[in-house]
Each structure stands twice: as structure tokens, then as C-alpha cells.
Amino acid sequence: MDRSITAAGVLLGMAIGFVTGVAFAVAKRAWSDHTKTKALIPGLKTAAWTSTRTSAGRFTIAGILVVAAIAWAFIGR
């Protein structure tokens, strides 16, 4: 009887230890990813704003060309 209780206690302890170990590993990895990503944010913000400015400039040029084409079509009549 004592052996079955001891074996059950050992198995339960191993299961709890495994679950706790996995949870700790996941939390440690998440914290590491968070720290790395937080360090990258300034560079990512700069890249995003540069991309936005480039897109806005191209959109403006395309808009001016469209307005010029429409004006040319009306004036040419």
C-alpha cells in the first residue's frame, strides 16, 4: 500500500514539475522576445515613417499627374 502511494506521489510530483517547467520556459521565452522587440521599436518606427513619407510623395506626384491629365483633357476640347 505504501509503495502505491509513494509511486502516485512521485508521478504527481513529476507531472506538476513538468507543467511548471514548461510554463517557466514559455514565460522566459516570452520575456526574451519582449525585450528584443522593445529594443527594435525605434528602428521599426523610423523605417515605417520613411516608408510612409515615400508613399505619400509618390501619391502626391500621381495625384498631380491625374489632375494635370484631366485639366489637359478639358482644355484640349
Image: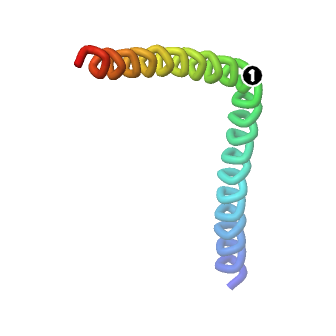
Q: Is residue 13 above or below residue 29?
A: below
Q: Amino acid at mark 1?
A: Pro
| Residue at 66%, 71% in the rendered image | 7
Q: Nearer the viewer, residue 50 or 15?
A: 50
- Report x, y in % for residue 42: 75, 22
- Report x, y in % for residue 64: 45, 17
Read off the residue under disc 1.
Answer: 42
- Residue 65: image quadrant is top left
Q: Nearer the viewer, residue 61 or 32?
A: 61
Q: Residue furthest left?
A: 77
Q: Is residue 21 left or right of residue 52?
A: right
Q: Nearer the viewer, residue 58 or 72?
A: 72
Q: Which quarter of the rendering shows the N terminus? A: bottom right
Q: Badge 1: few (under 14), some or many (20 or more) residues near its Cα, within 10 Å?
A: few
How are the residues colored?
rainbow
- Report x, y in % for residue 26: 67, 47
